[in-house]
């Protein structure tokens, strides 16, 4: 599919030397190329910046744009800087440990050919876990079930989402700029999209890989992360119990998921990429 809306991909990055190369290369090597790939470097102190410059040299024809966001530490202002820099009809957003499936841009173009779509999100494949094919089906089923359960405020998952540029310009003065301090910035984004009347859809073929490194956290840190759902909705004075369902689901899968990941990393004899610097 060569027609359809133009697509930018925004990748916020902070100290991601272990994952950024695979992330960017997957974004470049799409069956239908993205019009822009914008990596926003947020005060990285490791070799992230040098690796990005090397990628520009290695892929001189790729639409790879590197910008710095040095005013504030955090994923929300870094995401916003990338969104504001994007010039395409649709702005994709992934994490710096995401690895897009080769058809991702093509699928996004198909989804947003429907002018009523304001944002879209899709399932994940956990590439550093065992039973990846089974896990991908389970993840897809879980996310579709959660979105059906929540009749009003649909989620957009920050590791795999896209937003129409016009929708972003409509909500950018309303989003919570410090959302990642205590809340989930992607859930906050979804709330503002809904409140401004933008339709969010789920696409099962809009697939991205991501790391399960969140499971490496100790139980208290993981619970603190999960409770950000509650804090996000409390902040917005939204008290629909159905919207707390992700807290229950992600809390329930933690013990088994952590055990499976530990066994997987043990089988690799010291593998793993560690928790994100933005994990909180």
Image: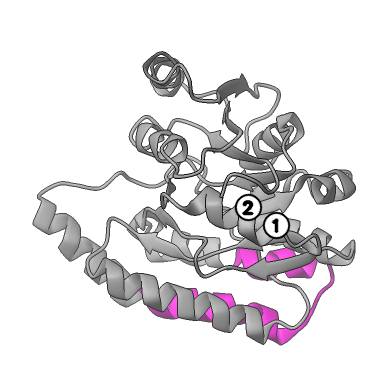
- Judge the density around disc 2: few (<14), some (14-19), many (≥20) Cα neighbours within 10 Å: many
Q: Residues within 10 Å of mark 1 (few under 14, many from 20)?
A: many
Quarter of the image where one finds residue 91? top right
State the separation of the CA atoms marked 1 and 2. 5 Å
Considering depth in this image, is 203 or 251 the residue closer to the camera? Answer: 203
Segment colored magenta: 227-254
Question: Answer yes or no: do the residues labelled 1 and 2 have beta carbons within 8 Å?
Answer: yes
Q: Secondary structure at mark 2?
A: helix
- Residue 250, position as x, y percentages in the image: 47, 74
Q: Is residue 141 left or right of residue 241?
A: left
Q: Tell me: residue 269, above or below residue 14.
A: below
In the structure shown, which secondary structural element does the residue marked by tag 1 occupy? helix
Residue 253: image quadrant is bottom left
Residue 112: which numbered mark, if any?
A: 1
- The relative height of residue 165 versus residue 193 in the rendered view (above or below) is above
Q: Is residue 142 a member of the stretch shown in magenta? A: no
Residue at point 46%, 19% (across, down): 49
Residue 280 appearing in the image: no
Q: Residue at x 72, y 64 (%)?
A: 232
Decide if residue 142 is on the left or right side of residue 185: left
- In the rendered view, tell whether residue 26 sits above or below residue 103: above
Q: Is residue 256 left or right of residue 202?
A: left
Q: Residue 271 at x, y = what percent?
A: 19, 47
Q: Is residue 36 visible?
A: yes
- Residue drawn at x 62%, y 46% is 92
Residue under pointer 2: 109
Q: Looking at the picture, does residue 141 appear above or below residue 263?
A: below
Q: Residue 265: give x, y in percent of width and height.
A: 18, 56
Q: Nearer the viewer, residue 105 or 140?
A: 105
Residue 82, x across and y down, in percent = 67, 33
């Amino acid at each position: 599919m060569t027609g359809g809306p133009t697509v930018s991909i925004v990748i916020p990055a902070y100290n991601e030397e272990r994952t950024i190369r695979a992330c960017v290369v997957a974004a470049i090597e799409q069956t239908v190329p993205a019009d822009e790939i914008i990596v926003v470097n947020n005060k990285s102190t490791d070799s992230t910046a040098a690796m990005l410059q090397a990628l520009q040299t290695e892929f001189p024809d790729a639409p790879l744009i590197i910008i710095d966001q040095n005013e504030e530490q955090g994923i929300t202002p870094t995401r916003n800087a990338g969104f504001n820099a994007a010039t395409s009809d649709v702005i994709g957003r992934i994490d710096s440990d995401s690895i897009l499936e080769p058809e991702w841009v093509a699928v996004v173009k198909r989804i947003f050919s429907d002018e009523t779509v304001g944002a879209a999100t899709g399932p994940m494949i956990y590439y550093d876990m065992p039973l990846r094919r089974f896990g991908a089906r389970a993840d897809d089923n879980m996310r579709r079930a959660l979105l059906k359960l929540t009749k009003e405020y649909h989620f957009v998952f920050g590791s795999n989402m896209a937003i129409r540029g016009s929708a972003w310009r409509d909500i950018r003065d309303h989003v919570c700029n410090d959302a990642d301090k205590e809340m989930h910035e992607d859930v906050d984004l979804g709330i503002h999209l809904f409140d401004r009347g933008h339709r969010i859809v789920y696409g099962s073929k809009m697939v991205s890989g991501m790391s399960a490194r969140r499971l490496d956290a100790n139980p208290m840190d993981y619970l603190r992360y999960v409770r950000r759902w509650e804090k996000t909705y409390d902040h917005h004075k939204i008290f629909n119990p159905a919207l707390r369902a992700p807290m229950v689901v992600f809390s329930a899968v933690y013990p088994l998921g952590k055990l499976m990941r530990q066994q997987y990393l043990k089988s690799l004899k010291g593998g793993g990429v560690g928790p994100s610097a933005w994990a909180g």
